[in-house]
Image (spheres, grey):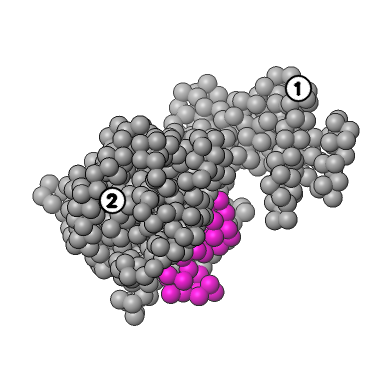
Amino acid sequence: MARLVLDVAKREGSVQLQPVFTATDVLLASPDVTSSERVEAVNLRDSLIEASPERHFFRAQLARRERDHHTALQEASAHLALYPSHKPALVLRATAAMQTGRWGRYCNEILALASIEGNARSNEILDLFQRFRTAQGLSSASPDDLIIQQELLETPGAVYEYAMEHAPPPDMDARQGVVLLTGSLAGGGAERIVATMLQGFRRMESDESPQLWLFSKTDGAAGNALFYLPLTGLCEDELHIIDPVQKPGEPFCWLPPFYAQRAQAIYDDLMRVRPRVLYITLDEAIIAGGIAAVMAGVPEIVLHCHNMSPPNLHGDDRLSFGWDRAFRALLARPNVQYINVAQAAVDDYLGWCKVNPADCRVTVIHNGVDFSTIDESQDDDLPRSIRRELGIPLRSPVVGAALRFTEVKQPLVWLDAARQIREAVPKTHFILYGDGALLEASRAYAEELGLGDCVHFPGRVSDLAHRLPVFDILMLSSRSEGFPNVLIEAQAAGVVPVAFGVGGCSETMMPGRTGLIVSDKTADALAAEVTGLLTNRRRLLKMKRAGMGFVREIFSLDRMVTALHQLVYGGQPARTAGGKTKKDCNDT
C-alpha cells in the first residue's frame, strides 16, 4: 500500500501530502526496502513539500521528527503567519515550544491554544503548563511576567529544582539490593563497562546480586540493543525493561515527554523493588532516573558518566538544554555520588553545571580492560588472515580505527588525514571497523579521495581484540571523547595510538612514550604525526613495547571492577584534603 501511494504521487505530481508522509514513514521502517527505494521515497516526499503552499507546516513536521524542536517552532510560526487559524499548526507549534524546554520564553505560543475548543492535545498541553506555573507560584502572572521569569518555567532544570525541594528524605526502611540502570547494552564503550561491572558484581556479591534495568532491548541507531548481553552473564528474561508510562504524574509530567514517561516508570519500579542503591550510567538515563530515585527516597544514588559534558559531546545544548541545572540539583544531595572515567571529563562536567568539587561526592575511575583476550591474539594467525582477506600486502603499514560512524568521531576528517598519509607513505593501507549513520557517506568520501583500493570498511566485529594487532597505528580523530577504551586496547595489542588532545585521551597513555597526542585538531596535524611514526620504524617499535607494559600495569579490569564495587556497595568515596577529587588506584 505504501508503494502504491508513492507511485500515484510520483505519477500525478500533485497529491495530498499527509498520505505521502505516512507512506514514506512505512517504507523507511520496512526491512524489505532497498537503499535506492528509501532515497527515492524521501526525495519524492521532499520535492512535494517544497512545491506545496503549506511547505512550512510539513517542514515543521519533519523537524519535530528529527527532534529539532527550534526549527519546528520556527517553521510552524512561518506557516501560521500565512494561515493564522490552522489548528494542527497551532498544536504543532505549542508542542515544539514545550519540547524546547523553554516554557516561559514561549508562553505566548503555548497560551495561543486557548483559542482551540474541544481539542484533546491542546487541552493536555495547556493543563501541563498551567499546573507547572501554579506549582512555581506564577499562576497570576501575565505572559510578559512569565517571559521575564522564564527560568522558573524551564525543563528539566526548574523541574529538578522543584522536585529536590519537595522530595522526601532518603528512606532506609526495608531496603535491599542494587539496581543498575542504563539505556541499552548496545556496542559502545560505556555499555561494555556496565556489562563487565554486572558480571563482576554478581561474582563478588552472593547476597545482593544486582539487577539490570534497561530503557529498551529494541535495536536502534546504536545497533543491537543487547550486543553485550552475553558479557553480563544474564539471560534475556532476567533483564528488566522500563515500560514508559503514558500519563505521568507530578513532578515527572513536566519533564520533556521522553524523560517524563520513563521517570514515572522508574519511580514506580523503585517504589516496588525498594533497592538500597541505584547506579545510573549515561546522561539520558541519569536525567530520567535521577529525579525518580530522589522522589522514591533511594538511600544511595550513583551517577556514572563516560564522556565530556553534553554540550561538549554534541556541539551545542539543543538536546541537553537544562541538564546542567538538573545535574547541579542532583550533585548537591549528600546521598548522590558522581563518577567519571577521566579527570578531564570531571573538570568539564563540573564546570558546565557550575559545581565546586568540594561541595559534592566525586571521583575518577578509569576504565579497565580484559587483557586476556588481547594476549590470546598475539599468538594466532588472524592478523595475517585479515591482510589476506582484505588484500593488504604483508609488509604494508596499516593505520586503523574502531568507531561508531557518527559526527562526533569525525570519520571524514580521519579520511582526509588518510589521504595525506597515503601520499607520504604510498604503501599504507587503512582499516575502519564499525558502523553507524555516516558509514555510507564515509565509503563514498573514500572513493572520492581516490582511496577506494586502500581503505577498508569491514563493519562492526565482535572480536576486535583479536583484530587490533593487524594495525601499526590506531588513529583517532574524535572532536570529543571521555576516556576511549580503544586507545588502551590498542597499546595492549602492540599498536601505537595517535589521537587529538580531547577529553581523557591523554590519560590513556604516556604521551610521547606510548602514544601521541595531537594538539592542533586538524587532519593535516594528525597526518603529520602518523607519517612521522611510519617513517621512523625504530621509534614506532620502541613505543609499541612501552605501551604494552604501561597499560597492563595501570588499566587492569580487576582494578576497575574493584573500585566501582567499593563505591557502589561501600558508599562514601575517599577524598584528598580540602574535599578535592581523589583519583582511584587506576590513575597514572
Q: Earlier in the sequence, mark 2 or mark 1?
A: 1
Q: Which residues are magenta?
A: 216-239
Depth check: 491 or 125 in front?
A: 491
Is residue 208 found left or right of 269 in the rendered image? left
- The residue at the point 66 percent across, 36 percent down is 62
Where residue 278 sits in the image (x, y, percent)?
A: 38, 62
Q: Residues within 10 Å of mark 1 (few under 14, many from 20)?
A: some
Q: In the figure, residue 574 lies in which quadrant?
A: bottom left
Q: Position of residue 93 (x, y in %)?
A: 65, 31
Q: Position of residue 339 (x, y in %)?
A: 30, 53
Pick whichever, 84 or 136, lies toward us. Answer: 84
Residue type beneath disc 1: Tyr
* Residue 496: image tag: 2
Measuring 57% from the left and 44% from the top, which residue is drawn there?
Answer: 440
Q: Which mark is residue 83?
A: 1
Of 176 and 510, which appears nearest the observer? 510
218 on left or right of 49: left
- In the picture provided, is 546 more to the left or to the right than 184? left
Residue 277 sits in which quadrant?
A: bottom left
Secondary structure at badge 1 equals loop
- Say whether residue 483 is visible: no
Q: Amino acid at mark 2?
A: Val
Give the answer, above or below, for where 549 lies relative to 42. below
Disc assigned to residue 2: none
Which is the main secondary structure of the residues drawn in magenta? loop
Judge the density around disc 2: few (<14), some (14-19), many (≥20) Cα neighbours within 10 Å.
many
Residue 225 vs 10, above or below: the answer is: below
Residue 210, compared with residue 337, is above or below; it is below
